[in-house]
Image: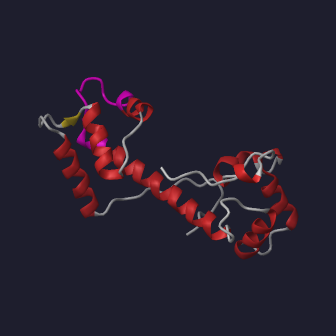
Amino acid sequence: MFFSQAGARPRMWEASPSEHKKWVEVFKACDEENKGCLSRENFKVAVVMLFGYKPSKIEADAVMSSVDPNTSGILLKEFLDIVRKKKEAQLYWNEIRHIFTAFDRHYRGYLTLEDFKKAFKQVAPKLSERIILEVFRGPQSPVIAPLQKHLLLPPPSATPSQLSFPPCS
């Protein structure tokens, strides 16, 4: 499934009723004192339970700084919104990874100009070779510079060993 335009953000994603129920159950399980909110440490435990990793100090700080200072932690509504956004981002990056993998025919972890040409022939057969070269050239191209972060293009000076796809988070 491809986004309709370069730079498209993940569309609003809605959790299934069973997934939403799971999130609420995790919130309740982590709300050890039944205060109706999660402390910083309880939030970290909830993220581990739902996403399988412990959030970094920076991520926890960002979440806690967005919490209403009149409360003693993250309320259920805020928690559900945070989890939904994390899930959207996860799905978005999984989709990008899937697309990249489809074009990386030799499983090298990077795309050559030939890979680019073959990929664009499949998805946009009428696109001129000049445009494909502009995309491949990356950030020094005035056409591509604004799209750089969405196309996952390496810097122009990158060596093949530096052209790997970012790891899963």
The residue sitting at 69% across, 70% down in the picture is: 106
Q: Quadrant of the N terminus?
A: bottom right
Residue 82 image offset from top left, x and y in percent: 36, 44
The residue sitting at 23% across, 27% down in the picture is: 71
Which residue extends farthest left?
Answer: 34
Which residue extends farthest right?
Answer: 130
Quadrant hosting residue 105: bottom right
22 with respect to 150 (left or right) = left
3 is higher (above) or lower (below) than 158: below
42 with respect to 106 (left or right) = left
Residue 57 image offset from top left, x and y in percent: 41, 31
122 with respect to 37 (left or right) = right
User: Which residues are drawn in magenta?
Assistant: 64-79
Magenta-drawn stretch contains 70 = yes
Which residue extends farthest front?
Answer: 161
75 is higher (above) or lower (below) than 101: above
- The one nearer the camera, 26 or 55, is 55
Residue 46 image offset from top left, x and y in percent: 27, 44
Magenta-drawn stretch contains 131 = no
Count of marks placed on residues: 0
The residue sitting at 38% across, 33% down in the picture is: 60
